[in-house]
Image: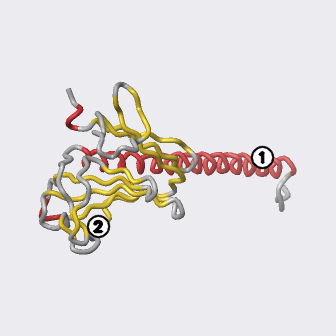
Amino acid sequence: MKRRQAGMTLIELLVALALTALLGVMLSALVNGWLKVRERLDEQVSETGVVDFCLALERRFDSPVLRRLYEQRLPLATRWLDWQPDRQQLLWVAAAAWPQAEGGSRLQRQRLRFEPREQRLLLETSADLYAVAAPVWVLRERLERVSAMNVLYHQAGHWLAWPSDQTAHPGRGVRVELVRDGAPYTCTFVLPWGRA
């Protein structure tokens, strides 16, 4: 007569512990790999934000128009591009592709504005060329976590700081340099009158 075994042998217990440890290591590696992939995707989303912002800005630089503007019924100086370093903003007028979507006016003011305290870069438009008061700006694009911004212009084969003489022609191109999340980015735009 055979005796029935009531429990597990030591060898069976050791095999069960080894299998449990192996499954734990494999699960840990799987979770760690998944977290690394997620971090990489988050980084790519961050970079895509800069690319999308630069593409939106490029569309606005494709069709600048020299047009007299008014604020509070007073004419403003006529400039192709008006860089105002004290306000950290660049202003210009451009033709819009969809006038009905942007206030019914084909020509619109454009404004690229940096807010250092909030650490953001804003692209805004206004259909109000002849503003009785301050123009009403509509936000088109926003880029967060920007700690620095600089605007340069291209002339005679060099990228230069914006000229103090605002009546000067802005040259063949515009470059926006910015720092986002500690990483430097540069967006370069060829102006229509500068294309060969």
Disc number at residue 138?
Answer: 2
Is 39 above or below relative to 187?
below
Amino acid type indicated by mark 1: Ala
Quarter of the figure with the C terminus: top left
Disc 1 on helix, strand or loop?
helix
Residue in view at x 26 percent, y 45 percent: 61
Image position of 115 (left or right of 172)? right
Horizontal and vertical percent position of residue 81: 29, 48
**Which mark is nearer the camera, 2 or 1?**
2
Horizontal and vertical percent position of residue 44: 47, 46
Query: Which residue is identified by label 1?
Result: 18
Disc 2 on helix, strand or loop?
strand
Quarter of the figure with the N terminus: bottom right
Alpha carbon of mark 2 to alpha carbon of mark 1: how far? Answer: 64 Å
Q: How many marks?
A: 2
Image position of 17 (left or right of 146)? right
Residue in view at x 70 percent, y 51 percent: 24
* Disc 2 packing (10 Å; few <14; some 14–19; many ≥20): some
Along the line of sight, which residue is nearer the eye, 51 or 32? 51
Along the line of sight, which residue is nearer the eye, 8 or 133? 133
Dot placed on the residue nearer the N-terminal end, 2 or 1: 1
Along the line of sight, which residue is nearer the eye, 158 or 146? 158
Instruction: Locate residue 136: give its quadrant.
Output: bottom left
Amino acid type indicated by mark 2: Val
Instruction: Locate residue 158: give its quadrant.
Output: top left
Horizontal and vertical percent position of residue 175: 38, 39
Is 142 above or below relative to 148?
below
Horizontal and vertical percent position of residue 123: 34, 57
Along the line of sight, which residue is nearer the eye, 16 or 95? 95
Residue in view at x 19 percent, y 63 percent: 129
* Disc 1 packing (10 Å; few <14; some 14–19; many ≥20): few
Residue in view at x 41 percent, y 40 percent: 152
